[in-house]
Image (spheres, rainbow, N blue to C red):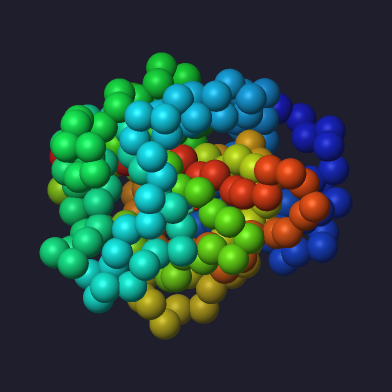
Amino acid sequence: MTLDLFGSANDNARHDSPPADELGPGAFVLRGFAQSQLVALQADIDAVVARAPLRHWLTPGGKRMSVAMTNCGEVGWISDRQGYRYGTHDPLSKQPWPPMPASFVALARHAAEAAGYPDFRPDACLINRYALDARLTLHQDRDEREWDAPIVSVSLGLPATFLWGGLRRGDRTRRVRLAPGDVVVWGGPSRLVYHGIASVEGSFDAQAVRYNLTFRLAR
Ligand code: MD6
Ligand code: FE
């Protein structure tokens, strides 16, 4: 892992995430793992978004999600009145989702490997964009066909407070600050842990959004 020279150790001291990077069994925050690639990753995100625009899905209950989403890869995560699922085509354009950029594939594989999951080959990459008021309520990722592959999650843009709970919805949650370049990898006994995004940290920066890439093997 790269040495952190930019002060996130100090930032951590202001939050309750310990400097230790293990969230639980099989679950890790790789601090700054994608730091050197942020500009290239953002360019690749912009290219995907040009073909498959970010949009606010409706939940099955009919509420507009505050996080804007799109996908790349063989399959993409979709939500509407019919429920949550993966599909090969973008319901807006009726086209297949754009392919996963090579930079994404390599980063996901290397991060999984660093966390002890060799040979991760994701077929789905969900791109999330958070404005300052966006939230993601506590949930499990369970729409994938099998749960033996890990999930790799990359943070870009504004920092956020990530909620890390347990295997039951009511379990205590811990607050973990995610900075741009941080990569969360989880699988094994932690694969179905409840998690969410409590808040995105405001700034006067022109690019006042957070992006998250979530890689999964969905089918
Ligand atoms: C986010 N992430 O970080 C939301 N899910 O914006 C997730 O919901 C998530 O980070 C499964 C695994 C890792 C994640
Ligand atoms: Fe999730």
Quadrant of res 37:
top right
Residue 157 seen from this side: yes
Residue that protrudes farthest toward the bottom in the picture = 170
Question: Which quarter of the rendering shows the N terminus?
Answer: top right
Question: Which quarter of the rendering shows the C terminus?
Answer: top left
Residue 126 seen from this side: no
Q: Is residue 141 left or right of residue 84?
A: right
> Residue 157: x percent and y percent?
64, 43
Residue nearest the viewer, comparing 16 with 135: 135
Q: How many marks?
A: 0
Residue under the image location 57 percent in, 60 percent down: 162
- Up-down relation of residue 197 to residue 181 (above or below): below
Residue nearest the viewer, comparing 189 with 47: 47
Residue under the image location 35 percent in, 54 percent down: 191
> Residue 174: x percent and y percent?
59, 69
Quadrant of res 160:
bottom right
